[in-house]
Image (cartoon, rainbow, N blue to C red):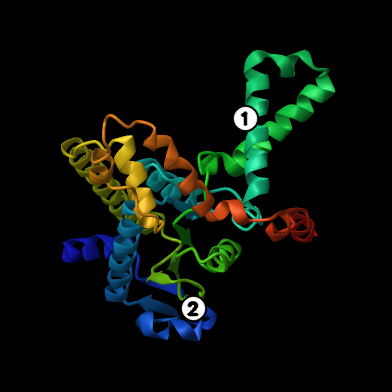
Amino acid sequence: MNKELARELIGAGVHFGHAASRWNPKMKPYIFGKRGMIHIINVKETLKGLMIAKKLLTTVVSGGRDVVFVGTKRQAKKAVQGASGKCGMHYISERWLGGTLTNFRTIRSRLQRLEDLEAMEASGKIEAQSKKQGARLKRELNKIKTNLDGVRKMSRMPGALVAIDAKKEYIALREARKLGIPTIAVIDTDSDPDTVDVAIPANDDSIKALEILMDQLATAIADGKTMVKQADITAMADARTQKPRSRRRVLASAKEQDGQPEVAPAAVSETPVAAPVEAPAATPEVVPETPAAEVSAADVPDVSKTTETTAQ
């Protein structure tokens, strides 16, 4: 499989790097040699990085997390969109807006605005506006949709970020690493491999090579989704075979975890039937032992001061 994939990648020109004069010395371990004035990338290192990236993505997705693809350069747009469509993940192919991850709340508000504008357009409210106002709303709609349409279903932080050309997408990679999100990137001979967690050395200007690499990563994500579905089916089957717990058993279990032993059923059964008056007599003996009744108002912390400090 690796030999066939290596031949396919070499045929797509994955091994051609940038001019030797533009190289980053940190890329030396990934360079096979030099042909003329161009560096040649070691395809073995490409396959090694690709395999590590696939294992990482499978693990992330099988844990229930999402992945976002980032590729805003012309050669990367088609590969990013194709991979996203194949595995059903998120993508950004036009422009990375600063704060897409670090200021995610604002991005979600812009996506909500996009939904509102689309609803207005569908209902004809935009057409009912004045010509100037309608044109302004349409421009706003198109702008938000162009930049954020690929992440409109991303309701939480992704579990991993995949970028094409680490040098160009340095803002996205920096935000992800700041938040502790694993990063995978296709890096050419002019990039810094220290800016990513998993580096895939490859020609980041070859459209065909990028499509092959992204397709491989999308396949790994699809495998991770399959593992999640199988785990859900197994969990559902186990839940059906288990005897449902009654409310009494659940409460008893909760009390035992809190260190409060429950009254044994045998002690209750020993109570004579002819003397039902003894049942209420046991009630006042349990209530004073509850520690919650001894808590005074002075022991309760002032939440308002904490809220004010947090807000500042």
**Residue drawn at x 37%, y 80% as measured from the top left:** 30
Q: Residue furthest front?
A: 274
* 98 relative to 28 in the view: left or right: right
Task: Quarter of the image for the N terminus: give it.
Answer: bottom left
Nearer-the-camera pick, 303 or 279 = 279
* 104 relative to 134 in the view: left or right: left
Q: In the rendering, which numbered label is found on residue 154?
A: none
Q: Is residue 157 visible?
A: no
x and y percentages locating residue 240 in the rendered image: 19, 35
Count of marks placed on residues: 2
Q: CA distance from mark 1 to mark 2?
A: 39 Å
Q: Residues within 10 Å of mark 2 (few under 14, many from 20)?
A: few
**Helix, strand or loop at mark 2:** helix
Q: In the rendering, which numbered label is found on residue 194?
A: 2
x and y percentages locating residue 198 in the rendered image: 40, 70
Residue indicated by mark 1: 115
Q: Is residue 93 visible?
A: yes
Quadrant position of residue 247: top left
x and y percentages locating residue 304 in the rendered image: 77, 53
Nearer-the-camera pick, 278 or 225 = 278
x and y percentages locating residue 173 in the rendered image: 54, 65
* 266 relative to 278 in the view: left or right: left
Quadrant position of residue 275: top left
Q: Amino acid at mark 1?
A: Glu
Q: Does 132 sit above or below residue 52?
A: above
Q: Residues within 10 Å of mark 1 (few under 14, many from 20)?
A: some
**Helix, strand or loop at mark 1:** helix
Q: Does 18 sit above or below residue 83?
A: below
First in sequence: mark 1 vs mark 2: 1
Q: Amino acid at mark 2?
A: Asp
Task: Quarter of the image for the C terminus: give it.
Answer: bottom right
**Residue drawn at x 47%, y 60% as measured from the top left:** 164
